[in-house]
Image: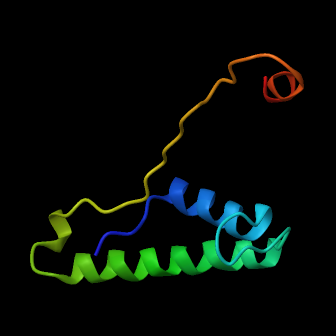
């Protein structure tokens, strides 16, 4: 069972527990954000161990994905200057 990449988990936890624009929609819930990331890491660890325990699992490549996309603001005005 695939586990979401780490970057996606961090983005989701930030949007859901800090910004509040994704469910559950909390604002500045740092403890909830940390708990979510900890639970996702525990799920990844359990999945890793289960895959490695399967026949041929030692050859399987399982790990965390580091995904980074850089966006550069385009345009004019106050929001552009802040984003730049």
The part of the image, by quadrant, that contains residue 75 is top right
Q: How is the image coloured?
A: rainbow
Nearer-the-camera pick, 24 or 54: 24
Say which quadrant the N terminus sits in. Answer: bottom left
Image vertical order of residue 41 relative to residue 63, above or below? below
- Expressed as whole percent of the image width and height from the top left, the position of residue 15 reads 69, 61
- Expressed as whole percent of the image width and height from the top left, the position of residue 6 reads 51, 59
Residue sitting at 43 percent across and 52 percent down?
A: 65
Nearer-the-camera pick, 20 or 1: 20
Residue sitting at the far left: 55
Residue sitting at 52 percent across and 57 percent down?
A: 8
- Expressed as whole percent of the image width and height from the top left, the position of residue 5 reads 44, 58
Locate residue 61 relative to residue 82 in the image: left or right.
Answer: left
Residue sitting at the far top: 76
Locate residue 45 relative to residue 55 in the image: left or right.
Answer: right
Nearer-the-camera pick, 21 or 17: 21
- Expressed as whole percent of the image width and height from the top left, the position of residue 45 reads 43, 77
Residue sitting at 28 percent across and 83 percent down?
A: 50
The part of the image, by quadrant, that contains residue 82 is top right
Locate residue 24 relative to residue 3 in the image: left or right.
Answer: right
Image vertical order of residue 17 relative to residue 46, above or below? above
Nearer-the-camera pick, 39 or 32: 32
Number of marks in picture: 0
Say which quadrant the C terminus sits in. Answer: top right
């Amino acid at each position: 069972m695939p586990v979401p990449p780490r970057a996606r988990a961090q983005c989701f936890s930030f949007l859901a527990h800090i910004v509040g624009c994704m469910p559950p929609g909390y604002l500045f819930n740092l403890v909830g954000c940390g708990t979510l990331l900890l639970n996702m890491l525990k799920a990844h660890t359990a999945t890793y161990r289960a895959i490695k325990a399967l026949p041929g699992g030692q050859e399987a490549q399982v790990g965390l994905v580091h995904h980074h996309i850089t966006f550069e603001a385009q345009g004019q005005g106050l929001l552009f200057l802040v984003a730049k």
